[in-house]
């Protein structure tokens, strides 16, 4: 049963009966504002040409008609151009009866749309470990993948590893200069963290070198040109591109350390790319594409042999696509990777999950691909998201002030352990069950706190706030699910038994029960909105409203000690459905919910 569809048809009949016209326009609904009675609000302004009357009279006419000629409403009120409708109990009950036995009533069959969508994330550089910023990237990418799957799309998770270039050369040079043969095994460190240490060491050494040169009277620009370290990095990068055996061997070794470290973090977070691309595999393909474009006049060459594209006519700037020494830049390999993706999968949509610091980069990339005549260019989308900051301020990789992802995850799990134990929520659990709960709560707190924020917004991550069991947090929602499961266990009814009982049609609903059924009816709409907006925050905030409404219902009304058996059974059914929707919605965010706490 589609409640809004029922109201749409009834209102069209009302317009025909009241104003003797077949209305073919749109019927526009809103949620009724909290200060007014009702659940569904009809916007009357688009109907005034048909009625020929004022908004208030039009609303009153329609409300009266619905009350006298249908069983859809139990009352109405008109506020200016808005008709607020109080939906009849039997309508809510029929709707609830319809969804009770449909476990996945808001989720499409997998791949039913036939559309293939690639989501690229987290696409890290191989010169440092994953950090808090990468976690927002991973959480957005993985949640969006689940939402798109729920809408019937075939989703391919791709990861592009930026595994060559200047930044990687910096870590390699630092290892050559200061490493003394260090390996992850010798140092007792994850490989990605070890390589990241060398990247920071290079940055510190370079900063000191520039400072010393400036003290000798050189300007900043002159110091940068005379930097011995910078020249060595350039030489390493060129040697790599010239297939120098020694440089390539070191590069392979250090990258292998990083990949092993990444894999450990990926496993903790439960992600695994379906397809991996590597800059080292595609950079030459990108160079070839640029040279072909140069022959066609799409690009131009400067006197120093660097290759550029002029995008000023499109409101952008001149963009470098090949350096004067013939080496590639990021956009060169992105051009090649886009070509490879199209060749490999013939995608209907390709989504890049990348921070908003790269907004300009993707505008340029998509425009270049259009100018190159790539038909798929119109199907590219940059899911831009704001940076994550801590109470201490912005993170900087080169200064070593980033929050390491592994350390943060470990800290969140430990905080969950301390908080949960202190609140006495582990009573009756075995040690393995308790440890699993701590991990579930720690990761859930981290994921949910980040995902509840609109991707476009910059956010402040507060670990202490994210673990609060009484706030707008993952643990609050997880605890609500555990609370409902406790109610269901005490009812001694199995899921099949709960669904087998007929939902009464003459039951007098309490407003808290109506609020819950109304919230449940929004699930499919929310998923569709999250899909079209590429915004998991819509799902995250929806789940919080469900959990909050259920807790209000639970505290105000008795479930197991209801006034009569019909009331008890209905509230058990309502509890069961709320738990299922909470679980399914949290799964879309890749967050687990416990059955016991």
Image (cartoon, grey):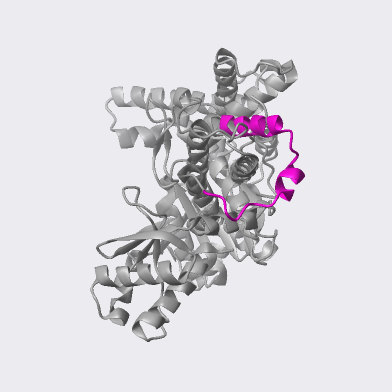
Q: What is the number of callouts on the image? A: 0
The picture places residue 319, in percent across and down from the top left corner, at: 41, 57
78 left or right of 199 in image: left
Give the main secondary structure of the magenta stretch: helix
The picture places residue 581, in percent across and down from the top left corner, at: 61, 45
Quarter of the image that includes the N terminus: bottom right
Q: Is residue 80 visible?
A: yes
Asked if the magenta segment contains residue 560, the reply would be no
The picture places residue 208, in percent across and down from the top left corner, at: 40, 22
Front in this rendered view, residue 481 or 417: 481
Residue 43 drawn above or below residue 593: below
334 left or right of 311 in image: right
Among the 4 quarters of the image, the one containing residue 252: top right
Residue 65 drawn above or below residue 454: below
Quarter of the image that includes the C terminus: top right
Front in this rendered view, residue 492 or 406: 492
The picture places residue 64, in percent across and down from the top left corner, at: 36, 69
Asked if the magenta segment contains residue 501, the reply would be yes
Q: Residue furthest front?
A: 564
Which range is magenta? 479-508
Q: Residue furthest top?
A: 422
Residue 116 drawn above or below residue 274: below
Among the 4 quarters of the image, the one containing residue 206: top left
Front in this rendered view, residue 339 or 577: 577
Q: Is residue 258 visible?
A: no
Give the residue drawn at x 55%, y 64%.
2
Front in this rendered view, residue 473 or 318: 473
82 left or right of 68 in image: left
Give the residue drawn at x 60%, y 56%.
505
Give the residue drawn at x 65%, y 20%.
189
């Amino acid at each position: 049963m589609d409640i809004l569809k029922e109201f749409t048809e009834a209102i069209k009949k009302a317009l025909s009966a009241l104003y003797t016209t077949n209305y073919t326009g749109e019927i526009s609904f809103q949620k009724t504002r909290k200060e007014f009675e009702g659940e569904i609000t009809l916007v009357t302004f688009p109907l005034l040409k048909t009625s020929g009357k004022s908004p208030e009279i039009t609303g009153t006419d329609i409300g009266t008609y619905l009350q006298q000629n249908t069983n859809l409403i139990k009352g109405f009120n008109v506020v200016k151009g808005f008709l607020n409708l109080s939906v009849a109990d039997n309508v809510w009950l029929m709707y609830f009866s319809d969804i009770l036995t449909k476990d996945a009533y808001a989720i499409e069959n997998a791949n039913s749309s036939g559309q293939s969508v690639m989501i690229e994330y987290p696409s890290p550089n191989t010169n440092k470990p994953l950090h808090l910023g990468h976690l927002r990237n991973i959480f957005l990418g993985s949640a969006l993948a689940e939402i798109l799957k729920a809408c019937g799309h075939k989703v391919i998770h791709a990861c592009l590893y930026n595994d060559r270039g200047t930044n990687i050369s910096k870590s390699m040079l630092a290892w050559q200069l200061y490493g003394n043969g260090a390996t992850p095994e010798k140092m007792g460190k994850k490989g990605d963290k070890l390589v990241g240490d060398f990247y920071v060491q290079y940055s510190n050494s370079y900063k000191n070198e520039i400072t010393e040169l400036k003290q000798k009277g050189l300007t900043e620009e002159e110091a940068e040109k005379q930097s011995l370290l910078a020249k060595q990095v350039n030489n390493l990068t060129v040697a790599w591109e010239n297939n120098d055996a020694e440089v390539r061997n070191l590069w392979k070794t250090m990258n292998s350390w990083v990949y092993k470290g990444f894999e450990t973090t990926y496993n903790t977070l439960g992600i695994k790319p379906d397809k991996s691309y590597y800059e080292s595999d595609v950079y030459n393909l990108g160079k070839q594409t640029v040279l072909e474009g140069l022959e066609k006049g799409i690009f131009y060459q400067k006197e120093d042999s660097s290759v550029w594209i002029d995008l000023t006519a499109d409101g952008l700037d001149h963009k470098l696509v090949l350096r004067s020494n013939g080496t590639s830049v990021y956009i060169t390999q992105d051009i090649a990777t886009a070509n490879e993706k199209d060749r490999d999968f013939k995608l209907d949509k390709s989504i890049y999950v990348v921070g908003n610091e790269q907004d300009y980069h993707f505008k340029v990339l998509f425009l270049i691909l259009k100018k190159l005549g790539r038909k798929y260019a119109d199907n590219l989308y940059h899911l831009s998201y704001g940076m994550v900051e801590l109470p201490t301020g912005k993170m900087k990789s080169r200064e070593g002030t980033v929050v390491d992802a592994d350390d943060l995850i470990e800290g969140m799990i430990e905080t969950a352990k301390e908080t949960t134990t202190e609140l006495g929520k582990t009573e009756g659990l075995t040690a393995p069950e308790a440890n699993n709960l701590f991990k579930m709560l720690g990761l859930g707190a981290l994921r949910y706190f980040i995902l509840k924020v609109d991707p476009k917004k910059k956010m402040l991550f507060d670990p202490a706030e994210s673990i609060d069991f009484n706030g707008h947090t993952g643990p609050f929602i997880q605890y609500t699910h555990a609370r409902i499961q406790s109610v269901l266990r005490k009812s001694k009814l199995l899921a099949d038994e709960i669904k087998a009982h007929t939902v009464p049609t003459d039951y007098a609903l309490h407003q808290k029960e109506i609020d819950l059924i109304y919230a449940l009816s929004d699930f499919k709409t929310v998923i569709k909105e999250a899909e079209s907006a590429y915004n998991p925050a819509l799902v995250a905030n929806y789940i919080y409203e469900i959990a909050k409404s259920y807790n209000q219902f639970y505290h105000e009304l008795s479930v197991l000690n209801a006034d009569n058996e019909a009331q008890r059974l209905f509230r058990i059914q309502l509890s069961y459905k709320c738990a299922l929707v909470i679980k399914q919605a949290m799964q879309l965010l890749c967050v687990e919910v416990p059955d016991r706490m």
